[in-house]
Image (tube, grey):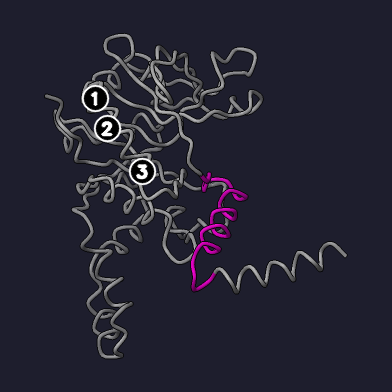
Amino acid sequence: MTVRPRTAVIPAAGLGTRFLPATKSLPKEMLPIVDKPAIQHIVEEAVRAGLTDILIVTGRDKGAIEDHFARNLELESHLETAGRVELLDQIRSVAEMANIHYVLQNDPLGLGHAVSLARDHVGAEPFAVLLPDDLLVDDSEFLAGMIETFERFGGSVLALLEVAPEAISAYGATDSEPIEERVVRVHGIVEKPDPADAPSNLAAIGRYVFTPEIFDALDRIRPGHGGELQLTDAIGILAQSQPVYGRILDEQRFDAGDKVGFLHANVMLALRRPDLGPRLRAVLAVSLGRDER
């Protein structure tokens, strides 16, 4: 019987250089998507999918992440005294939604290294990896589907996105074959290939469900693309010894690690909210109308 994953690993140790100067003193993962830090959206996604044990891989000067998920008794007391019960409940729920743990990545050695640091916490159980740059707004349906695929087939599962052939050089490109609707068997993966050399335009994006054997594969990799320890290299090794599958994304996804994607996510999520959408839509209509004159 396949053990159901219960832990989500969230790598959050990156330097956030694409968002400088904002990220000089504020972790990129704490930049708000509307009124929640990006990393809170990711934790909530994991919890909705049944992953209530959260391990966040942090770096130096990332204390704001831990502060965000900890209780703030002074703030809670102020809100309670002011009678702001709804906001008080929201603040308390942030600290109570999951069991959140932390491990420090001292050196920026790559995503593969960050995931390897979860070994002592995860042990011999399967687990998920969620990258904060990839924001899905589907009430966790896709992540839940990945877990269901894992339970059905018993092998690691990658989130895959069909991208334009010329864009594949920004991703890990998979060598795969279909086995059922929106599910493929992954035979290999190449990190950031030239479009002419890519095995396909099915790209791995920031959701994974792994068997614990990924840690043994991570032990075998050496610095690859960019001089970093690449998770994709470990996935390629894993695929040689056990089945690896891919589930193709058909939901909306925002690349919140890109400035335009970040702005797109903010606008679209705000437009969906009844308290913000009508006013924002009106403001945008006026602004866009002015730009077109």
Residue at screen point 28% across, 18% down: 217
Which image quarter: residue 61? bottom left
Quadrant the N terminus occupies: top left
> Which one is in front, 66 or 195?
195
Magenta span contains residue 13: no
Using a 10 Å C-alpha cutoff, classify the residue at mark 1 as few (fewer than 14 neighbours), some (14 to 19) or many (20 or more): few
Which image quarter: residue 117? top left
User: Viewed as shown, does residue 212 lie left or right of 135?
Assistant: left
Position in image of residue 178 (x %, y %): 43, 16
Q: Mark 2 near mark 1, Cβ–Cβ under 8 Å?
A: yes
> Which one is in front, 240 or 120?
240
Which image quarter: residue 284? bottom right
Residue behind mark 1: 152
Residue at screen point 40% across, 41% down: 131
What range is drawn magenta here? Answer: 253-276
**Rendered position, 28 above or below 79:** above
Using a 10 Å C-alpha cutoff, classify the residue at mark 2 as few (fewer than 14 neighbours), some (14 to 19) or many (20 or more): some
Residue behind mark 3: 141
Position in image of residue 269 (x %, y %): 51, 59
- Outermost residue to the left: 1
Please, what secondary structure does the residue beneath circle 3 have? Answer: helix
Compare marks 1 and 3 and give the one earlier in the sequence.
3
Compare marks 2 and 3 and give the one earlier in the sequence.
3
Q: Mark 2 near mark 3, Cβ–Cβ under 8 Å?
A: no
- Distance from label 1 to label 3 (Cα)? 16 Å
- Distance from label 2 to label 1 (Cα)? 6 Å
Position in image of residue 266 (x %, y %): 54, 59
